[in-house]
Amino acid sequence: MPLPVTVYRWDDDQAPQILSGNTSEVLNVLKKCLVEGYGDKQPLGWTVAFEETGAAPKIAFRNDTTKGGSGSYGIFKGRNATDDDQGVECQAAMSMTSFDDLLLAGNKQGFRVIKKNNQYDTDKWILIGTAVGFYFFGDYLDKYSNAIIKPLAGLYCGDLKTSLNGDVGRFICVSHFISKTPLYPTGTDGTKWHGSINYLQDATSSELSGIELLLPQTDGVKLIKYSVINRAKEVFSTDPLSKTTILHSLPVVAKDNEVDSDNTESKQSLKAPWFRGEFPGLFLSEFVFDKELLWPATINMIGGSYFLLRNPDKNNGSLMLIKLGEWDV
């Protein structure tokens, strides 16, 4: 079912700002976009299921079940359990009764929006989403070349575009695609890359093999380990004509030797299918866009307009785009 996409930006009228990079500021941006709205921007229609404010802010959002959403939870809190600027932890859960009681929860992920008033600032935020899923980015105003390797923030939270009807476990919250550990590498603000979905566009097969995304079975009985393919056309088709495709999606596939609760291997299972689904609206291009473009850029192509994501690797052009207008979910 297609759902309309809304774009929220730091430079919108009355948009919330990130002035320090503290957890509470990042959570406020998410809440304004998802639940409350600001200026003339209406919210996406999510709800707040649980929230704690004060010295250790945290919040759990649910997507809109009336628009086909799973109703699962995206949980956000400070990585240090305080309201500091050292990053936000995010996690999906199929259900929860409190922040300490999660049912069928995914891996903890991390991202950080930096505001130090120096060359590493990534406080210019953009959120692109629907009633059932959203992308969030912390970036900066400059050419796409990323010449000094700033650590970007980028995540997806919401339902996958699933391969099976009735998939109750399709909700995911993920920012970290290079490997599952260490979640927060040591180093200075300049060398920490923290975690960003932007890295998918240049990740190698060996790097992707380290990914472990936990998703509940389609019936919500057991957690299954999944990974991502960023060169899908070579896996799903041997047809030479497929090589002419300009854009292709990013499938989520089961890791080797995964079995469902009936001990059926994923490639034969309908409860833990090998091909679980795709990230809605997210595509990789078969050609590289000009790194001299200024962020944020919109690319107009046949079939619609696309927001171009920055490549976090130094001086490399960008390959990844998010479709605007509407997503099939």
Image (cartoon, helix red, strand yellow):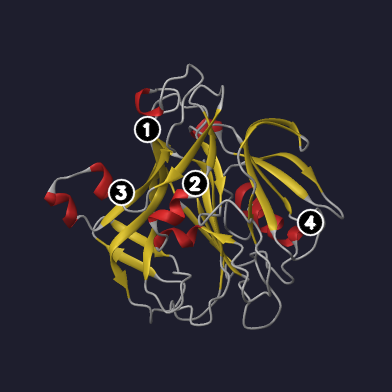
Does residue 303 appear to the left or right of 194 in the view shown? left
Question: Which amino acid does the dot numbered 2 rest on?
Answer: Thr
Estimate the spatial distance between the alpha carbons at disc 1 and disc 4, rounded to whole Å.
37 Å
**Which badge, 1 or 4, is on the more N-terminal residue?**
4
The residue at the far right in this view is 55
Q: Nearer the viewer, mark 3 or mark 2?
A: 3
Mark 3 neighbour class, 10 Å CA radius: few under 14, some 14 to 19, many 20 or more: some
Q: Secondary structure at mark 2?
A: loop
Say which quadrant the C terminus sits in. top left
Please report the residue visible at 44 percent of the width from the left and 38 percent of the height from the top.
Answer: 255
Q: State the image quarter where residue 274 is shown.
A: top left
Question: Which amino acid does the dot numbered 4 rest on?
Answer: Asn
- Nearer to us in this view, 170 or 37: 170
Estimate the spatial distance between the alpha carbons at disc 4 and disc 3, rounded to whole Å.
37 Å
Name the residue beneath numbered marker 3: 232
Q: Position of residue 249 (x, y in %)?
A: 34, 49
Q: How many marks?
A: 4
Name the residue beneath numbered marker 1: 163
Q: Which mark is residue 80?
A: 4
Q: Position of residue 65 (x, y in %)?
A: 55, 31
Q: Nearer the viewer, mark 4 or mark 2?
A: 4
Please report the residue visible at 70 percent of the width from the left and 55 percent of the height from the top.
Answer: 27
Q: Position of residue 167 (x, y in %)?
A: 46, 27
Q: Which mark is residue 130?
A: 2
Please report the residue visible at 62 percent of the width from the left and 83 percent of the height from the top.
Answer: 119
